[in-house]
Image (tube, coloured by chain):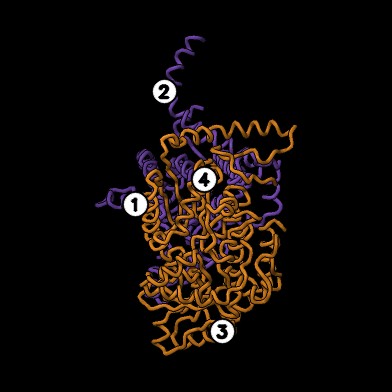
Chain colours: A purple, B orange
Amino acid sequence: MRARRRENLPGYLFLGPWLLGLMAITAIPMLLSLYLSFTDYDVLTPLSDAQWVGWDNYERMFTSDPAYWHAVRVTVTFALIAVPVKLAAALGVALLLNRAFRGVGLFRGLFYLPSLLGGSVALAIVWVSMFNRDGAFNSLLALVGVNGAPWVNDPTWALETLMLLAVWQFGAPMVIFLAGLKQVPAELYEAAAVDGAGAWRQFAHITLPMLSPVIFFNLVLETIHGFQGFTSAFVLSNGTGGPVDSTLMYTLNLYINGFVRLEMGYASAMAWVFLLAIGLITAVLFRTGRFWVHYSDSEGQ
Amino acid sequence: MSRTTTPRGDARPTRAHRTPPTGHTSRRRLLAAALTLPLLIGAAACGDDSSGSGKTELSVFWWGAEARAALTEQALDLYTRRHPEVTFKKTWQANQGYFDKLATLTAGGNAPDLFQLDDNYIAEYATRNVTLDLTPYKNDGRLDLSKFPESLWQYGVVDGKLAGVASGENTQGLVYDKTLLDRFKLPAPTTGMSWEAFIAWAENVSKTAKVPGTQDPSADYKAFWVWLRQQGKDLYKGKDLGFTEQDATAWFDLWKGARDRGATPTADVIHEGNVTDVSKQLVVTGKAATSWVWANQMPELKKNTKNELGVVAYPGDPSAQWARASMYFSVFRGSPHKDVAVDVMNFLANDPEAGKILGTDRGLPSNLDVRKQVADSVDDPAMKQSIAVEAELAKTFGPPPAVPLPGHSKIKTELTKSAEEVQYGRQTPAAAGAAFHAAAKAAIGQG
């Protein structure tokens, strides 16, 4: 036992810097925000003067703040549409690029490019100028005689425009899909072909099951990512969630409450509910994963 | 709430002014203390200056563009030349994100010694005792406000405490595209024309020039405010709202009528103009013939367009407008160099040379002597025009309203939201008026 402990020591030593970072940058602020979520902390008043308000913040969120539920609806709508479409696009393009043809490397690079730009502010700014009334997109539509909407400045389309931006950045899941596709043994397809299975059956009965761990991984990652969307909504709406709250994503609403309205206690409570909700969604995904995710290397279980 | 009138020497932010009930709260305080400890250590590590050697470094923080930064740095350098023992740590940034950063710095106990505020936030900072009460300095003359118009320095008083010193004066200004109007031989709008006449004028501009006559200001709190004051109402009255649901509905109705007549652009274009960003105002992007701004923004607006601009008062009786502190300088109550900070503030406001450097960048100089001197020497035509118009309006200025209540920034966003609901045709003026009134009441804690 003691020898074991001595063995562990270097391990902890090496972990030290990371642990320190975890404590300072993640753990302590998180605990602090948990405490704050039970107070009326307003940023400007010293922390020690923040009044304990019990469950008030949580109660307010669930019972008397329509903007909160509006933001939840916006975020769920965004995630429910943008995530599946993005994954489908990523898988579709990965299938196309999983062949040998001239210039395939170039195409892979080009499709991956948008994700390199990530949630960048510059990209969102470009999006705004492309999708307003006199933007490039409407000029394109005008060529075919369609009179486009003012997309980003139209409350019925602003969120969809944001979804499109998210979907367009499908490069990261695509690369992971590609890697997954390379792992599928070619002899499975050969055997299936010998047995007379067509392209669709091969896809449904070989590709999808073999790829299911990768699909699962991407689904979890992108779902979490989708719920956390902030930058593009912030830039598009100048930090307001407009037009008329159509892009008021959960995290944006949280930011507005914490930093613009200085209700940091309330914003902290929102952050904790958010964390729990995402945890719950992830847990549900893992549960359902048991029924459709197929791990080929764990057949012995 | 107790008030500390005498700053306690060189103490760090005083945290003892409010004693919560003892007993069950002690554990909570202990926890809070434990959680604050790292912050305090951080603050302490940043260190007090070497006050022994007589050197002082004062941190100054403001928002603005590069032009303002250059002027402010020049003025502060002048102070250092006169007082070599005082140097400055100057930090500035764009308006977007400024208040996030200031709030974060304040939370960490590291607020700058001297910082810029505006009337959207001064009440938030003052009521939470972040700003130093400058009354004692004013009383013993270390802060000289005698050359300020009475109403202007009073616009820095929150709950009886002098929370900030106006770094300039401005008032509402309706800016129009003179080049466009001249091209179509259209008359310019005039100060004192009624709202009805103005909307008819704008409708005519839309028809003749094929450019919408005016930005729709229904989402603009300052236009709403002036309009309210012209009817004997106000945005705030004491700690409550100064208008009713019917007033809000009538305001939205007025502009719905204007939109239906074609006096304004479509909702999405109005939305583009509903930002504070000077470069996106419709009068400079060419998407409307007039925009609703602050008169001192004229020179900035002019930088964003080739066309010539003109400025008049908002429609209706101009005496509803007031001398507003365009922004303030305030001193952090926890600053270790309060006296020096106040002296710098005094210098920026009253020194003729500093006034010459700063010009009208933050509005008309608050000190009337400095203002006259600047007005006589200025040669930028846009600046000249805004000075002339403000001087003209100053003759009829009514008494200023009280500084907006805490919650003002939320009221502003709620007004924008409700106005846009009507503009996009998603709500009737009556529904939006009711929703805005309720939300505004909730924002100031009266809901």
- The answer to which of marks 1 and 2 sits earlier in the sequence is 2
Q: Is residue B425 visible?
A: no
- Residue neighbourhood size for the residue with mark 3, other residues' Cα within 10 Å, grouped as few (<14), some (14–19), many (≥20): some
Q: Is residue B44 above or below residue B438?
A: above
Q: Is residue B181 above or below residue A194?
A: below
Identity of the residue furthest to the top in this view: A2
Q: Nearer the viewer, residue B320 or B178?
A: B320
Q: Position of residue A103 (x, y in %)?
A: 25, 52
Identity of the residue furthest to the bottom in this view: B185
Residue at disc 1, secondary structure: helix
Q: Position of residue A246 (x, y in %)?
A: 56, 62
**Spatial CA span between label 3 and label 2:** 76 Å
**Spatial CA span between label 1 and label 3:** 56 Å
Q: Amino acid at mark 3?
A: Met
Marks 3 and 2 close (CB-CB < 8 Å): no
**Spatial CA span between label 4 and label 2:** 47 Å
- The answer to which of marks 4 and 3 sits earlier in the sequence is 3
Q: Amino acid at mark 2?
A: Phe
Q: Position of residue A71 (x, y in %)?
A: 59, 55
The answer as to whether the residues below labels 1 and 2 share one chain is yes
Q: Which residue is mark 2?
A: A14
- Residue neighbourhood size for the residue with mark 1, other residues' Cα within 10 Å, grouped as few (<14), some (14–19), many (≥20): some
Q: Amino acid at mark 1?
A: Leu
Identify the residue at horizontal 63%, vertical 44% (top origin).
A41
Q: Which residue is mark 1?
A: A113
The answer as to whether the residues below labels 4 and 3 share one chain is yes
Q: Which residue is mark 3?
A: B193
